[in-house]
Image (cartoon, rainbow, N blue to C red):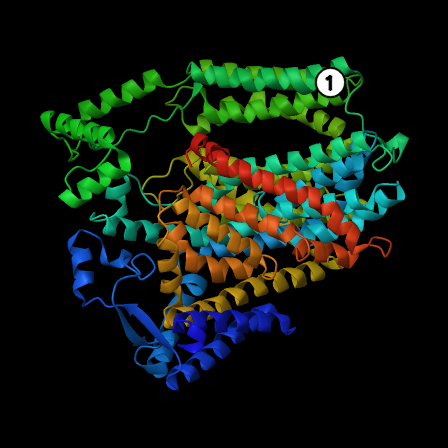
Amino acid sequence: MLFGLDGVEVGLIIVFLSLFAGILSGFPVAFAIAGAGIISFGIIAALDSAGILYHQAVDQSSEAFRDLVNTGIHPDTISKFRYPDLPLVIEPLLVGGWETALNRNISFIVNRMNERVFAGQSIETLLAVLMFVLMGITLERSKIANDLLTTMARVFGPLPGGLAVSVVVVGAFLAASTGIVGATVVTMGLLSLPTMLRNNYSPELATGVIAASGTLGQIIPPSIVIVLLGTLAGDLYSAAQEARATEAGCTDALTYLGEAAVVSVGTLFQAAILPGVLLALLYGLYAFGYALLNPSKAPAVVLDDDAVPVPGTGRRNSLTWFLAVPVILIGGSLLLGQVNVIGSQNITVASYSDASEGASLRTNVGDQCKASMIELHGQEAWDTAIAEQQAIEESGGAVVSHELSEEEVETALAEKIANAAPIGTGVAIFFVFLALVLTTARGVAPNADSRPLLIGGAGIVLAFLVDIVLIAPTTSSGAATVLLAIPMALVLYGLVHAIKLLGRNELLRVVFPPLVLIIAVLGSILGGITNPTPAAALGAGGALMLAAYRKLHDEGRSGQVILIAAFSIIVMILVGVNFDLRITRDSVPFEDWVAYFVALSAYLIAMFGILFSCWVLLRGKVLPPIVRETAKVTSMVFTILIGSQLLNLVVISFGGEHYIQQFLRSFDNEFTVFLIVMLVLFILGFVLDFLEIIYIVIPIVGPVIYGGTMDPKWVTIMIAVNLQTSFLTPPFGFALFYLRGVAPKEVTTRHIYRGVAPFVLIQVLGLALLWLVPSVVTIVPNLMGG
């Protein structure tokens, strides 16, 4: 044994030394990873051929091994770490020689590339990375971030530590729009650090709050880290739970767990919302508290008295229109939903009867699976499932559905019509949102002419009355559209006036457009309307239009074309939701033909608006750097993905992955295993970027940490927050190097390290909170059915 180490251990050391040497060599990381894989395999193959490396494995032919298996222990769980007294056998490190390992690696790399890069199930989700990057870089390069920071500084500046709080708010905005740590830290450093220093802010507080706020892009959706982690987590969790079910003696994970072993990127976005907002809130509270204790180091600042955007006049006006009225509108809608005044008007009746629901757990299983399921779910859950299955069988066990007769269909239809809510959910959400726009405009300009707003409000009330009195669940979409035309015209009249009033307020003018874009992207994902890729495409297109509108505004030109295109996108979505646009059906109603051509026209207008936006940005020399930077970032991501697959296969070829997993499984407590993994990831975060960690380390440890009883959403979010903490921790945190590169000369590295220390403690506090209270992660997905 070389240096008294097992051959697999020596191989792992060679791989990681080659990787670190490649990264420190100055070559692009994406190529250094692949090169490290090739070089390390060559070194290991040479040492193996020379007979220097060999592996000590458990002798599976020994009597002691057979005795353990006969006691019911699964062979895959037996290792020399858990049972060190078992007889060992000497094996070559590369079974069959380096030629066999090389051929197997080439075959595997082709399959891996096909599965994960070119044509696998995860490729559609990975495409979201491209468009999220495009969205973030577009918003960054179009000076929208600068507007946000300036406006927020004017709002929060008069408060103690107000500039620091404004950095946190804008950092959260940029995190939700870019998801790129480096871009956010550099942007915030260039824009806010000089301003804070000029206003006598402590260099420690200024640099600390900028670096910490920049790392929020790791966790606040739509985070690229979560997109990439999610694509891996879904595969790892499914495979690990299938293996766990097999070890338990069950046929599949659905039988053993009682639910599908699935976790999606959209669900992870839901899980990340509360932790991300919580961390941003803790940052802001610390900055505010620091300013109260050290007023000279974080003074209140009024950047421009004339430009401070005051939403309304007077506290009473603000409380009425910005707090009381929205609470009444939203709370009243939720209350009406509870009493079925607002609800679903779907009256679709299937031609076949529903199959009876099965028991909560599958009970037709073998003895070993039964024992494992009772151990997992408890005796009470098993007894309940047995009782449910007996009740189903006693009732005839109508598991197979049958075709309904015309009378049964009519009866079911009549029952659905009778139980349908008077006001449809879609109509309620749409008009409540418009009502919030009108009431916000009233609060912003209380002294302006309110008659158009009242007319718009009357239109909303009339729309609800029309929906209750004239629109039945059986009313076609076309007829409902016609009936709502007059109320909608009144609402639009009020909205035009409201938008003009809102546009006069600098805060709303600057914050509202990117906020709407972020809400549209996240809302479509979190609400289950679509998956991350189409939502990312919507965000990228919206960011281009927003940047072009900003460019035209700077040039003193009209952005009417872009506004019309944006309105067309809204029309296209509304038509697509309310009408059946499948014109290839045997019989297409006239109203659906009209809706189809309306949607087609809206689509063409929207595409023209996006192309026009691209032309405006190209003419203004804004688009070329956006495209170049987007290509650079996405190329790096996918090249690292390919290189990391090669490095992983090298580790697999000499049994390194299996060796590490056996070591981790030797611990009886899965939380101990997870804590070890978290510490390793934290240390690796000093020297490896999140891409390398996700694609190199997670596939190795994933089958262990995702193969237990821990919630995969909680595991993934804990990893993301842990990496965020690592990137912020001196002396190697990536965010600190990004900030050091753009900080003025008077700001020293010591300032940055001292300033970021309290925020590292906040991160550790956040991690501890997530560890002790996992519901912080799971509550939002549970409420939203994720």
Q: Is 584 on the left-hand or right-hand side of 628?
A: left
**735 in relation to 490, above or below:** below
**559 in relation to 401, above or below:** below
Q: Which residue is under mark 1?
A: 318
Q: State how many labels appear.
A: 1
Q: Is 93 on the left-hand or right-hand side of 721?
A: left
Quarter of the N terminus within the rendering:
bottom left
Residue 278 at least partly seen: yes
Q: Nearer the viewer, residue 202 or 123?
A: 202
Residue placed at 15% from the left, 55% from the top?
A: 70
Please provide percent x and percent y for residue 595.
48, 37
Please provide percent x and percent y for residue 403.
17, 33
Q: Nearer the viewer, residue 658 or 342?
A: 658
Residue closest to the far bottom: 50
Q: Is 747 on the left-hand or right-hand side of 122?
A: right
Residue 598 at least partly seen: no
Residue placed at 59% from the left, 59% from the top?
A: 689
Q: Nearer the viewer, residue 392 or 367?
A: 367
Quarter of the C terminus within the rendering:
top left
**103 in relation to 410, above or below:** below
Residue closest to the far front: 85
Q: Nearer the viewer, residue 704 or 250?
A: 704
Tell me which corner region of the image, top left, top right, bottom left or bottom right, holds residue 519: top right
Please provide percent x and percent y for residue 515.
65, 37
Residue placed at 14% from the left, 25% from the top?
A: 391
Please provide percent x and percent y for residue 301.
86, 34
Mark 1 falls on what kind of element? helix
Three-letter amino acid code at disc 1?
Answer: Ser
Label 1 environment density (alpha carbons within 10 Å; few <14, some 14–19, many ≥20)? some
